Image: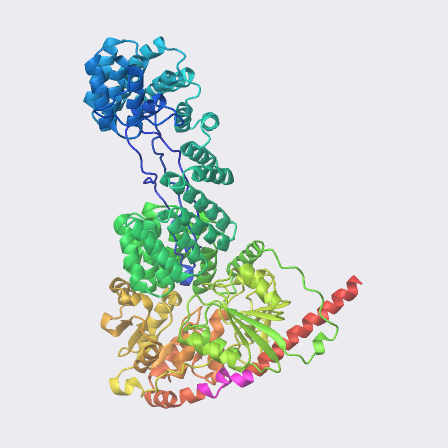
Amino acid sequence: MPVVGSIGAAQAKRSASEEVDPFGDDDFVRVDANGGHATQDAPDHTTAQHGRQSRESCKRVRANASISPEDHVAALSLNHDEKEIAPPSTQTTPEGPQQQIRLAKLLLQRGKQKQALQLLHEMITTDSADADALCLRGTCFLAEGNQAGAFASFAAALAVQPLHTEALVACAAVYKTSGQLLKAVSTLETAVAAEPSDATVQQAYAAALNALGTQLKAQGQRVEAQGKYKQAVQICPTYADGFYDLGVYYSEDQQFDMAQKEYEHCLKLRPHFAEAHCNLGVIHHLQGHLQQAIAAYQQAYSHAPNLKLVRDHLAMAYSDQATQIKQQGDTAAAILLYEQALAYSPCYVRAVYNLGVAHAECGQHDKAIFMYNMAIALDPAFAEAYNNLAVIMREVGNLQAAVEACEAALHIRPSFAQCLNNLATIYTAQGRALEALHLLQAALLAWPAYAEAHNNLGVLQRDMGSIPEALVSYDACLKLDVNNRNAGQNKLLALNYIHGGEEQMVCDAHMEWGREFQQLFTPLPQLPPPNQDAADSAEPLIVGYISPDLFTHSVSYFAEAPLRHHHSTAVKHIVYNCSPRGDSKTEMLRGATEGTGAVWKDVAKLSEQTLAALVRRDGVQVLVELTGQTANNRLGVMAMQPAPVQLTWIGYPNSTGLPAVHYRLTDSLCDPADTGQTFVEELIRLPHCFLCYTPSTDAPEVGPLPALLNGFITFGSFNNMAKITPKVIDVWVKILQAVPSARFLLKNKPFACPAAREHVLQLFVKKGIAAHRIDLLPLAPANADHLAMYGDMDISLDTFPYAGTTTTCESLYMGVPCITLAGSCHAHNVGKSLLTTIGLEQGWIAQNESEYIELAVQAAGDLHALSRLRGSLRQQTRSSPLCDAEGFITDLEACYRQLWQRYVHQSKLSKHRSG
């Protein structure tokens, strides 16, 4: 689906007029699993991708830029250790103007502005030229919010005493508060000229220059702004805010070294300046020094634990640290850090989202769903959260919810390539071929280099039977991503549909892929040599089976025999169930396995490295993988060689290509001794068919021959469209031409799509077969319904060069004989092996295309023989070696024992030579 970025912090900025919210609107895109999904591999190697994590902007709150009028009053107020003075009354008034001023200041300090103003009014009435009283009255007016009265009082004080520094500073503060910064600076220049060494005047002047610098910067006059900032700290070297704003200025210009120097200078002057600590952390954060960033943010937090800006930056830093740790493979530790991030900022949506991604990667679907829904609640326009929610819903089998989540994401962002791809994979699985095609085309238009979309387009084309086009799509994916496992394995599978397995190109492709894939994995440490008597030990062998297909899947009908019928005295088997989703068949197989005393382990959530280590710890002696190059395989486990003897069986008609897989189970009909097909593995031929079929328990009874009721023969095939090549259709058309009354029944996933049905129908029509003779049906909703459809078929026609397997067994069990064509490779000969094993050698196995047509026409001409065969075929199949689980397992266990003894013997020889 599947690659992962991180959420970062951006430099805090000073605004001339307002605070800025710390969360920006940057684009935020995740990547996979695999896809992904995170990337999770979807069935048929489709990849759902989850969206990548990103950085976002964060801006700081504005710090005080000047000393307020209240600060000014405090600077001029009485010391706290002086005696309290009683409030004025009409009976007593302190003697002397200075005592009255002192009392007025004390009253103001204690919030009794009205009483202070009353006292000052009496003083000014007595002496209207008292500049100190006029100035203090202005300060009282400011405390009441009376700006006009305050300004008038300061002006009156200056009229009396033009260089009254307190009045000049206070008057400048009024100018500054009202945005008249030039007047404020001009007024303070006068004050500085009058009192050049007065610290209060210097700081007020610096604050005004600083504010003017911020105003100029907001107007785009950055050079002039820098000059004002520098002038401010030159006038007042102890003015911390000046160094702070210089730090912001340099940060905005990406001059981080200069910015860091200014912030550090600021913090020497004011160690508890939380915003400076925070912005210093932002610089470390942007430079990738997360530990230093977190330390700086923690300093800010210790001084201002309730400042949202600081909490948000801490959340961002811990979230980024979590993402780094998750990329290193420690998802559990990452989850703890995401939770720590949310402890600081519970509504930090990116951490909520990333926590959902981490839970999804751990297979904790319920938690992931909760976190994605929380992210959507916090940010209803969060397209990535909807996309990832869709991926999870698809994985848990809730396709309707998955579709709705994809549609919500695409409503927000119509060109969201990953979501277009993910919705296409759902439609592909549902057989909505044309809609899936349009979505994949849109995804590739939005992102031409989107490798997984090319792969998924290949899967769709394969499902439609367009194998050459699918190979082009797989190659396009591999050109963009040379190590794309899905595309590489899909390509190998596709080659089997249109090329004989014996062709050198096909053999070389498997060998080359396996050699390169093997190099991606480090083998586990070599096992010590077995004991000398291990070969003759009566102890049961420990045999492990690895499969992702232990649900209602073709492989499960052949895996059931060993899982259910192994003899505990000969084999102790362990089942490593890798199925992403189980069903009732999974539970039945689990019960059958555990009923023999064997062990069943659900390992779908384990990585291949972890699973290989588990197999090694379990002491497995013979490890059998049942998937080959098909979807959700665990060939990486085999590549690490956790067991001394390793085999491949059932799931794939060709080589794994892996040198670490020693043997391949087959039979002498599928792979005769003179076969031209080459394998990396050594072929081990079982005495009968290499498969043992366990029929479905919900199979309906065999019905009468349809042709006797219909008056015409119905040929049919329920094989997937990938196997129905143009050459196969040519042969089927000739059969229909030779039997003009016959009809043809096809059932396939894409036939849920009208456009797909019309496409396939035209393949017959263009060759002269009337459309009304062809019936195209979509997949049945349940297995019993699927099997019941054989009640409408008289004769089943096999595909080539990739013959049916489960489809052929089901046809035979439902009383429908099958005509197959023998060939020169394993995939081509499976039908031959199955039919021979149940005793249908004569009249049903053709050696060439002409004979194939002839046998079909011959069988269609004898309805009574067909009817008799239909009535007995189920029992014939059931009583044949194909369904003889006891006999098959006896042979299989003997095979395992021989391979183990060979390993022990070879180990002895190797030890002897080395000694």
Would you place residue 21 above or below residue 719 in this image? Answer: above
Query: In front here: 109 or 507?
Result: 109
Q: Quadrant of the N terminus?
A: bottom left
Q: Is residue 636 shown in magenta? A: no
Overall secondary structure of the magenta section:
helix
Would you place residue 184 above or below residue 671 in this image? Answer: above
Quarter of image, res 47: bottom left
Horizontal and vertical percent position of residue 425: 35, 59
Horizontal and vertical percent position of residue 18: 28, 31
In screen coordinates, is 536 left or right of 716? Answer: right
Query: In front here: 399 or 151?
Result: 151
Query: In front here: 683 or 121?
Result: 121
Point out the stretch of residues depicted in magenta.
877-888
Quarter of image, res 597: bottom right
| Residue positioned 55% across, 85% down in the render | 887
Q: Is residue 879 shown in magenta? A: yes
